[in-house]
Image (cartoon, rainbow, N blue to C red):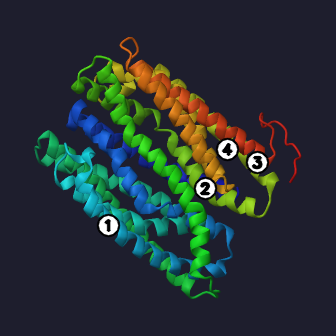
């Protein structure tokens, strides 16, 4: 078994355990926060993740691509430049966040400490991104897998301990839920930086050659800027989506509280269940970025073609049974959170959305590895523009309401999948059916 599949299986196993714990985390949150509290918690998370994304500046992706493509003798010099760059970038971002975060209206209905917890996340994410990128590029997936599982288990332990020991009002309960998220992030930062320090000492003792800071920045920025742009747009759409959905539902005739509860059932229950198998897709993504980058830098198109076939087959083999199970067992699955018939119907209607995203995630890694970040960005913009337009128009109609929202989500997933797939097939010279390899200009 080659290193790609060994690393993938390791990540899948560890991430599966982590997702099982995440499932329990969301069950605890659903029971302790209730439908409205869970809606509030899920509504603010996209905004938080947007700030976290800015803090990471997609360094895990750009560093892993650099490590995979360049000879080992350049790694020491590159890491020294990256550490200096991260210190400067983090300091600037902390100042900006301290100035502007108090004026972001998304946090107005939350506890005042919420903003400061978000600020505390910035340096944690920035410096752990260096370690993540290094381990991904070296394909040392055991450390990535351990960090993922560690975060989940720490968060679950803190949630159960605090909610069992104390009684909180809704506002404080939401704050406590986020405190456990930040605390779990701190634990994995300590773990990753400790492991990175050990590895870095080994790199320092090996023969190395100097590479200029300008060359490192150009290499990293060529990946980080377009990839960050893609992720920022993706995060912005996720940050806007809760408010768009609730606004459309209110316009259709629902009260604000009912709209928040319905979004909580959608994001906190249906989406949690529907994206549970995506841990396999994310494991593939982590492994694919350095693997595809290295194969493309070596112009090994036969490997790229074969790898695409294998990834599509793996996704088909787990994705189809998963969505079939979601469709026929929707009610007992959603009742594990709270008794809500609407959440079960959401899970059933959104099966195309979930299945197609299982394909989209590894295909996005392929596009990054092939240097097609701009294409990935344009695809995301077009699909979300059409999806959001349909969600607003149809969700505002009294006869559709949440059904209209979900139709728009499904249509966006179809468009994004097709655009990614056609672009990859054209780039690496493979037929659209994946049944025969075609010769092209390469």
Percent x, y of residue 330: 42, 23
Q: Secondary structure at mark 4?
A: helix
Name the residue at 30% across, 44% down: 44
In the picture, the quarter occupied by the N terminus is: bottom right
* Label 4 to label 1: alpha-carbon separation: 39 Å
Q: Depth check: 425 or 167 in front? A: 425
* Label 3 to label 2: alpha-carbon separation: 20 Å
**Badge 4: few (under 14), some or many (20 or more) residues near its Cα, within 10 Å?**
some
Q: In the shown orientation, is residue 246 left or right of residue 257?
A: right
Q: Are marks 3 and 4 in contact (CB under 8 Å)?
A: no
Q: Depth check: 282 or 397 in front? A: 397
**Badge 3: few (under 14), some or many (20 or more) residues near its Cα, within 10 Å?**
some
* Label 3 to label 4: alpha-carbon separation: 16 Å
The relative height of residue 122 versus residue 271 in the rendered view (above or below) is: below
Percent x, y of residue 158: 24, 53
Percent x, y of residue 251: 31, 21
Give the number of the mark in front: 3 or 2. Answer: 3
Q: Which residue is mark 4?
A: 311
Quick check: can you spot residue 145? yes
Give me the disc on residue 427: 3
Q: Which residue is mark 2?
A: 287
């Amino acid at each position: 078994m080659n290193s790609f599949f060994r690393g993938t299986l390791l990540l899948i196993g560890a991430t599966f355990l982590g997702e099982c714990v995440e499932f329990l985390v969301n069950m605890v949150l659903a029971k302790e926060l209730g439908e409205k509290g869970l809606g509030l918690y899920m509504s603010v998370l996209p905004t938080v993740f947007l700030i976290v994304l800015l803090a990471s500046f997609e360094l895990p992706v750009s560093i892993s691509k650099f490590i995979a493509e360049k000879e080992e003798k350049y790694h020491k010099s590159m890491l020294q430049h990256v550490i200096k760059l991260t210190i400067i970038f983090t300091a600037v971002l902390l100042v900006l966040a301290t100035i502007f975060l108090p004026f972001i209206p998304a946090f107005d209905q939350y506890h005042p400490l919420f903003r400061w917890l978000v600020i505390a996340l910035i340096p944690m994410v920035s410096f752990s991104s260096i370690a993540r990128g290094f381990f991904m590029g070296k394909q040392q997936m055991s450390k990535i897998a351990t960090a993922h599982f560690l975060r989940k288990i720490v968060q679950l332990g803190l949630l159960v301990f605090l909610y069992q020991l104390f009684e909180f009002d809704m506002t404080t309960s939401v704050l406590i839920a986020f405190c456990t998220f930040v605390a779990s992030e701190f634990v994995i930062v300590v773990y990753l930086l400790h492991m990175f320090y050990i590895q870095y000492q080994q790199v320092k003792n090996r023969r190395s050659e100097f590479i200029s800071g300008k060359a490192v920045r150009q290499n990293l920025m060529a990946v980080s800027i377009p990839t960050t742009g893609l992720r920022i747009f993706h995060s912005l759409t996720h940050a806007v989506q809760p408010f768009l959905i609730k606004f459309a539902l209110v316009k259709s005739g629902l009260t604000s509280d009912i709209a928040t509860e319905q979004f909580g059932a959608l994001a906190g229950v249906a989406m949690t269940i529907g994206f549970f198998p995506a841990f396999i897709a994310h494991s593939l993504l982590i492994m694919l970025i350095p693997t595809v980058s290295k194969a493309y830098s070596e112009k090994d198109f036969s490997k790229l073609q074969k790898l695409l076939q294998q990834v599509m087959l793996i996704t088909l083999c787990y994705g189809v049974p998963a969505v079939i199970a979601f469709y026929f067992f929707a009610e007992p699955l959603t009742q594990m959170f709270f008794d809500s018939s609407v959440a079960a119907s959401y899970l059933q209607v959104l099966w195309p959305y979930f299945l197609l995203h299982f394909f989209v995630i590894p295909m996005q890694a392929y596009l990054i590895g092939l240097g097609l970040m701009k294409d990935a960005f344009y695809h995301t913009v077009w699909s979300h523009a059409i999806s959001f337009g349909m969600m607003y128009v149809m969700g505002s109609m009294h006869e559709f309401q949440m059904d209209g929202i979900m139709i728009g989500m499904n249509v966006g997933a179809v468009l994004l999948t097709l655009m990614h797939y056609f672009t990859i097939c054209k780039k690496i010279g493979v037929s659209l059916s994946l049944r025969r390899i075609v010769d092209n200009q390469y």
